[in-house]
Amino acid sequence: MEFAELIKTPRVDNVVLHRPFYPAVEGTLCLTGHHLILSSRQDNTEELWLLHSNIDAIDKRFVGSLGTIIIKCKDFRIIQLDIPGMEECLNIASSIEALSTLDSITLMYPFFYRPMFEVIEDGWHSFLPEQEFELFSSATSEWRLSYVNKEFAVCPSYPPIVTVPKSIDDETLRKVATFRHGGRFPILSYYHKKNGMVIMRSGQPLTGTNGRRCKEDEKLINATLRAGKRGYIIDTRSLNVAQQARAKGGGFEQEAHYPQWRRIHKSIERYHILQESLIKLVEACNDQTHNMDRWLSKLEASNWLTHIKEILTTACLAAQCIDREGASILIHGTEGTDSTLQVTSLAQIILEPRSRTIRGFEALIEREWLQAGHPFQQRCAQSAYCNTKQKWEAPVFLLFLDCVWQILRQFPCSFEFNENFLIMLFEHAYASQFGTFLGNNESERCKLKLQQKTMSLWSWVNQPSELSKFTNPLFEANNLVIWPSVAPQSLPLWEGIFLRWNRSSKYLDEAYEEMVNIIEYNKELQAKVNILRRQLAELETEDGMQESP
């Protein structure tokens, strides 16, 4: 298929662009295979370059021969184009609709994008499982890398290389995979160097109504326990939902077969409930007519902050089991690709200082989201404005980023990255020129040959010129476990995401710049103080030598 076939009118003059915080601009609108471009051809006027894949929905209005297209983006922005001529307006609208809903992944922009920067680091090879394993393998000999999933034969949503207990052979892993949802047998998520406790994750056990058991599964899970120690299984579903899953062939671990494990149910919502929550929240944020009561009731009705609280509470529980109880844990919900990953990754941010650095956080996303099989292509196909309801969309990754922002806000000096880093990851998960978030798992990415045909997001982010935008000037390495508050009063709305197109951040930006200047000036003064102290010490030494006979 040629993109030209979908573009009925490639160019229209005298189009007026309205967007938040900018004056209206008149210029020429151009449609390419992947971008909507508006250029005013005036100096000092910023052009609009919008990826078609960032368009969530469009509305059309007509007054006489003047047409208006309202474009609602996946990053929650709303843009208005006034187009002279009804035919041109209809042609542009139908072209945008066709180009923003392409079925084939290989027609998306990452396959056509050519970087304008020099690639210093190939992001596709920045966070390999072998490298991550080396970071803790010196502290323990109880774990090994398994290549049982080479060619994705055992589990289509796992990477080819996984970390498992050394005492468990590959044949046992194959048997356990038949007992776990989607073949997702328990694998290592995190090793806590302080006490050797671990977080493992998996899919639900396929116990069914007959209470089926798998001795290999019991052996694998028990292999993670120290002698005389108990472990915890954190199920991210309510007990009721977990029991209902048995009727469909799923279920949970029976106490009789896992006597050394205590099961805890923590209900975290998923799928359409989360999607509806996001739609309600964005709708409330965009409505400027609210009085205080109406705004607060709409915010509460969205339940967004309730979901944040549920996820953070479960992550704190997981971290508590590891650090305070000295107990290993296994986390799963149904598939183990959504709420499970929210909890495992947030628990690591609480426990592990490296996860609070830029590279450590990138490694966490690579390991706990991309390689772990979170279906980004399905979950991020649509955002808050789309009219067509699909089954698979859900802002699971955005909720995770929101939870990270909540912790960052409570511990502003403990993170090497800033809020802009989290916003950038949200934007690229939904629409990007990079191939990192394409596909639903490593198996799909392998078939699409993303490493050969597209550029990694990390190749761009980790350039020194870009990193400076994402670095937190307040950062001071903190090697302690950090315990966030999950009290409702401690969890505000993330304005940087949800209100950034509704009110100007000009004063906040100015304040941030001033803070950076103060910090830099403080560093300069500190350096001068150190030099003066050295000079004083040298003078005192010289005086002492002169006084001695």
Image: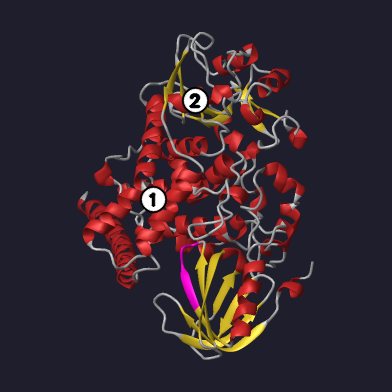
Indicate the position of residue 1 as horizontal and vertical percent values: 79, 66
Indicate the position of residue 467 as horizontal and vertical percent values: 50, 60
Vertical comparison of 534 with 115: above or below: above
Residue lying at the far right of the rendered structure: 1
Q: Please say whether residue 401 is visible from this viewpoint.
A: no
Classify residue 343 as left or right of residue 524.
right
Identified at 36% across, 61% down, the residue is: 285
Would you say the residues marked 1 and 2 are in contact, meaning their CB atoms lie under 8 Å apart?
A: no
Magenta stretch, residue numbers: 75-80
Give the labeled residue for mark 2.
Answer: 242
Asked where in the image residue 248 lies, by quadrant, the reply is: top right
Indicate the position of residue 72 as horizontal and vertical percent values: 50, 67
Label 2 crowding class (10 Å Cα cut-off): few <14, some 14-19, many 20+? many
Q: Reply yes or no: does residue 158 show up in magenta.
A: no
Q: Amino acid at mark 1?
A: Trp
Identified at 68% across, 75% down, the residue is: 32
Classify residue 337 as left or right of residue 542.
right
Q: Which mark is residue 405?
A: 1
Q: Please tell me whether mark 1 or mark 2 is closer to you in this view.
A: 2
Vertical comparison of 393 with 33: above or below: above
Identified at 29% across, 68% down, the residue is: 289
Which is nearer the eye, 140 or 351?
Answer: 351
Q: Tell me the SS state at disc 2.
A: helix
Which is nearer the eye, 10 or 483?
Answer: 10
Q: Amino acid at mark 2?
A: Ala
